[in-house]
Amino acid sequence: MRHPLTFALVWLITLTAFGQTKRQSVQRPVLIGVDIAKPVLSLISPYRTAFRLGEVTVKVPIAGNRYLSVVAGYGQARSDTIYRNIRMKLSGPYLKIGTERLMSSGLLVGWHGMTALTQETATYSYRGPTFGDYVVTAFDRQRVVVGMEGFFGYQQTLSDRLIFRVSGRATVAGLFGTRSKNEPAVLFVPGVGVALGDPVAVGFGLGLHVFYRTNPRPVAVSQP
Amino acid sequence: MPNAFFCSFMRLTALLTIVGSLIVLALTGCENCGPTAEPLLNLSINTGTQARPDTIFSPDSRNPLPARPSPTYGIQSGLPVNLTADSTRYVYRLAGRYDTVTVFYQRKTAYRNRKCGYVLDLYEPERGPKARTSRGKVESVSYLPNRNANFLSSSENTSIYLSIRL
């Protein structure tokens, strides 16, 4: 699973370089950010689930007040025993590309198309105090995720280089691949988060981003 | 007049909603999901006398068989079934002699719902004997699967009944 993530990061760096060139003409910076809410999610555990998430965002200025928005990340959820005797492990990389419009008030609105690969493994078990535990693999499958999300938020300049942003999103995605109807629904989808529904999953998320400007914010200078 | 009809209709709707919710709650609350650990075997050894086994163990077990209630009418109840294999052997001592009884079964599991997860059932084997004994003969073997949650009583559970006559 590391190779797709590496690919995504290389692509982000390429986009950043592209943005640096464009910056000369539009005089707006490329923004590179991380979601600081994701590590916090590792501590909060619905379904007694441990999350490992990492996400990098790059905003490249395009025409007007719009940005090209590229998000790459990796998500993993490992559940404790749920639904009486099942344990799940769900992981995979995801990539989101879209545009956003930034208003002068700091408000922003945008959309992303998204794709992800998800590796889903589940086992169930019965305790065997006398003869040993009986552990069975329920499924071990890969599926492709394709979806779309809308987001809105507000950003505040912290310094010449740093911007803080809070945003909310709603994501709808379809999971394509083999799944028997006699198997439990997915619990977590990379890029969607804790998901409701299968094979059409819906998820909501809150993002707390810190962005780094690739060129400092211009400072007003008084004329003599 | 229309107001009175509307009020009656609303009361009836509310009443039906409450009754329906209670029925759904009662039904889901009664669902027996079956065992979460090794199911149990009830072994009946008919000797034709008052003699009862004084020792019983399984040569396949990692740990000693759990303590069980005293045999009633010669039935050794609460013997755990080995879920890591399709058969379980039990060795018992009766009047100083050791004998072995083996029960065969097939394990089947299926995902039911979020409350029960995967449920387990034991069925008779597709081929071969249901049980074997080194002494006497097998009288009967019964498999009680909990298919489709047909056990409404929490005291019933997936289990096997084995009866041998010496």
Image (cartoon, coloured by chain):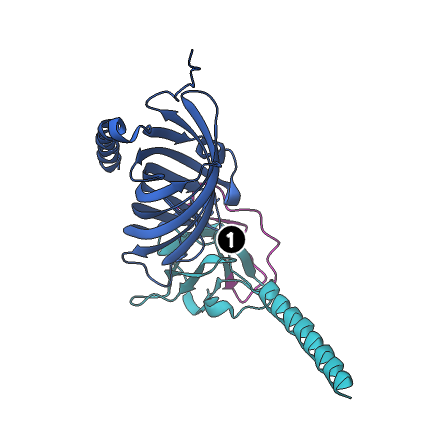
Chain colours: A blue, B cyan
Residue A46, percent across and down?
A: 52, 43
> Label 1: chain?
B
Please give the name of the residue rendered at 47% of the width and 36% of the height, measured from the top-left corner.
A106
Residue A20 covered by magenta stretch: no
Instruction: Name the foreground residue: A7 vs B93.
Output: A7
Q: Position of residue B18 (x, y in %)?
A: 69, 71
Give the image quarter of residue A65: top left
Instruction: Look at the image and say whether residue B58 sits in the magenta stretch.
Output: yes
Q: Position of residue A13 (x, y in %)?
A: 24, 29
Front position in the image: A208 or B81: A208
Q: Which residues are magenta?
A: B43-72
Residue in the image at 48% along x and 23% along y? A158
Closer to the camera, A25 or A39?
A25
Residue at 39% from the left image edge and 45% from the top image edge: A110
In the image, what residue type sits under mark 1?
Ala
Is disc 1 placed on a helix, strand or loop? loop
